[in-house]
Amino acid sequence: MDARCGGRARGFRWGIGLLLLELPLLAGASARTTNFVVEASSTEVARQIAERAEACRRDIAVAWLGQELPNWPRPCPIRVQLTRGEAGGLTSFGFHLGRVTDQSMKVEGRLERILASAIPHEVTHTIFAAYLGGPMPRWADEGASLLSEDERELARHDQIVADLFQRRGEFPLARLFVMEEYPTDLMGFYGQGYSISRFLIEIGGRPRFLRFVRDAQRQDWDAATQAHYSLGDVRELERAWLAWCRVGGRSHASVALALGDQARPTAPADRRSPAP
Ligand SMILES: [Zn+2]
């Protein structure tokens, strides 16, 4: 499984690489933390990215799972290519018997954008992979990982979602949830995944969102919608999401995962929600 995420457009897995088709092998410096080993053009860059990845791994796991992940048996390699462009990333996974067997990451872009955007995003993919032990549905993997990024990226995706509705480009949720192939309108696809992820997290918190996605893969989306959100089915969920969008759900402030303060929206929302 690959999670492929470009700076201006994002994709993941099974063949859509937008910016990062292949990075050249870097013969630079490296830095190591408990769970990451980073190869970059200088030791200082490698150190900054390794420490950022380690902090994101801890904070994002707590936000989504309520606890930190155990240390990985092998550090996740990260290859870094500094450019003058926007940040992008690619994370690849292997799974076997419900567990991650290998993972690796590549990031590129300006250093400050890598630290603010690409590393939190890519590390979120590793948290989801560890939780599910297998591939996450595309809309959820990408849409929810976007929530780890900084205000600039969230604002950009808010605009993408606004544009999507203006041109009535959204997919019915029943279709979006099971899409395995990327549509032509890739940005709209990511934007809609981001919007519905934000809505579900706002009404139920992050841990519930993950349980919803996990159970939907085991059963079906209607049953998981009933179990976790007390809505009749996916069509009812869709009506609620669209109503939320109409009353200003595009404002991302309420659910943004500002690292260091990430657990704040989760607990109250979980307490309000009726389902376990
Ligand atoms: Zn991604």
Image (tube, grey):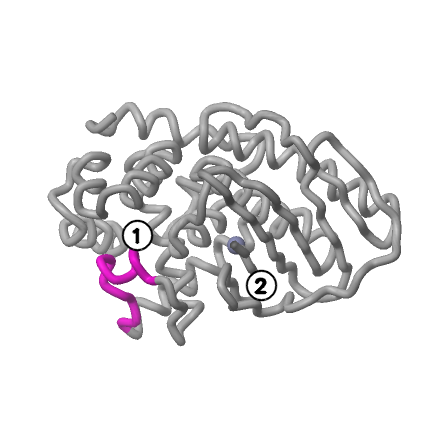
* Some atom of ligand 1 lies within 8 Å of the CB belonging to the residue at label 1: no
Question: Dot 2 surroundings within 10 Å: few (below 14), some, or many (20 or more)?
Answer: many
Residue picked out by circle 2: 6
Residues in magenta, as a range? 168-179
Q: What residue is rendered at 29% in x and 23% in y?
A: 271
Amino acid type, residue under disc 1 in the picture? Gly
Between circles 1 and 2, the one closer to the viewer is: 2
| Secondary structure type for disc 1 | loop
46 left or right, relative to 169: right
Q: Nearer the viewer, residue 265 or 215?
A: 215
Q: Position of residue 225 (x, y in %)?
A: 21, 42
Q: Is residue 173 magenta?
A: yes
1 and 2 marks in contact (CB < 8 Å): no
Tell me the residue that label 1 is attached to.
Answer: 248
Residue drawn where x is 34% and y is 25% of the image: 268
Residue 39 against residue 50 in the figure, above or below: below
